[in-house]
Amino acid sequence: MTSWRQHRQMLISFTFAGVFLTLGKFSLDPNAGNRPVKPFAFAEVIPLPGWQLLKSHSLVEPVASLPSSKWDSVLASQKYYYKQNNQQMEIEMRYVVGTLGDLYGYFTELSSMRLQKAQLLQLRQQEGVGFYSVFVYQGRSHLSACINPRGSSTVTSAQFATNRHTHDLQLQRLVPWLLGKESLQDRRCLWVHLSIPLNQVSTETTYSVLEKAWLPWYQWWSGHFPQH
């Protein structure tokens, strides 16, 4: 009985110590839980099985798209052009921090494309990858999604928040957070946007091409997500 009480007291002591450390960190560090993100630059060449890279270039965007806001700031961006037989595909990548993970918000704030929210709600899910959106706009078929730092790909803010609660709020991440090595909730995202021309073929045919390219692209970036 004594041993059980001793263990219980030790557990309570550790719990209180953790609470006081957390409160102290928030009191002394106004940026606690929101660690600055390291600079990042996209590689000019990214392998994509079955596709030939024609060229790539950075997109004309400021370092922070919304410098006065802590939401949806673009730290880096790149556009890639690929070819497979007679089919050409464009892929835009944006490394966004402080995001809520909402695809409609992404297009509203960070893209020249002007879409209605209903156009983006054609959600699909791929096993081992996650959610993505497909739609047609100005004669091209498109596929868009957010690659998360942890967890599957997402499209909506609800999906993104679920990933944060499920994968970020883990006990093993408490110490790195207290040491200032990680943010408590990691609101970073690699927004991916693939598109190909319709070229008088069915929409589903073009969606299939995009989905086949999306799988290896997601897998590569899951293993090369920018370091915090």
Image: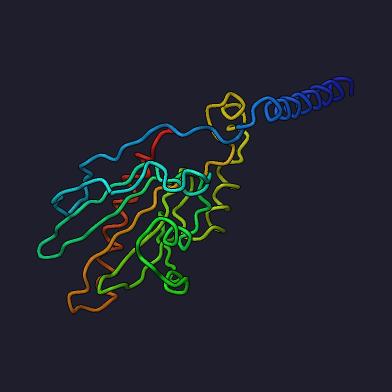
Where, by quadrant of the figure, is residue 172 drawn? top right
Position above or below: 219 against 40: below
Q: Quadrant of the N terminus?
A: top right
Residue found at the far front of this picture = 68
The tally of labels here is 0
Position of residue 112 measured from the top left corner of the image (x, y, whole percent): 35, 61
Single out the residue that lies furthest toward the left.
85
Q: Which one is nearer the viewer's eye here, 18 or 126?
A: 18
Give x and y (percent) for residue 92: 30, 54
Left or right of 87 in this view: 73: right
> Which corner quadrant of the image does residue 85 belong to?
bottom left
Q: Is residue 141 toward the left or the right of residue 3 in the image? A: left
Q: How is the image coloured?
A: rainbow
In the figure, 139 relative to 2: above or below?
below
The percent position of residue 43, horizontal first and vertical second, equals: 25, 39
In the rendered image, the quadrant that contains the C terminus is: top left
Q: Is residue 132 shown left or right of residue 196?
A: right
Which residue is found at the position 40% from the left and 45% from the top? 74
Front residue of 68 and 165? 68
Q: Residue furthest right?
A: 1
Q: Nearer the viewer, residue 43 or 225?
A: 43
Which residue is at 14% across, 59% downward?
Answer: 84
**Residue 178 coordinates in the image, percent (x, y):** 62, 26
Q: Residue at x 31, y 57 (%)?
A: 214
Q: Residue at x 37, y 59 (%)?
A: 111
When the figure is inspected, residue 223 is found, relative to residue 105, above or below; the finding is above
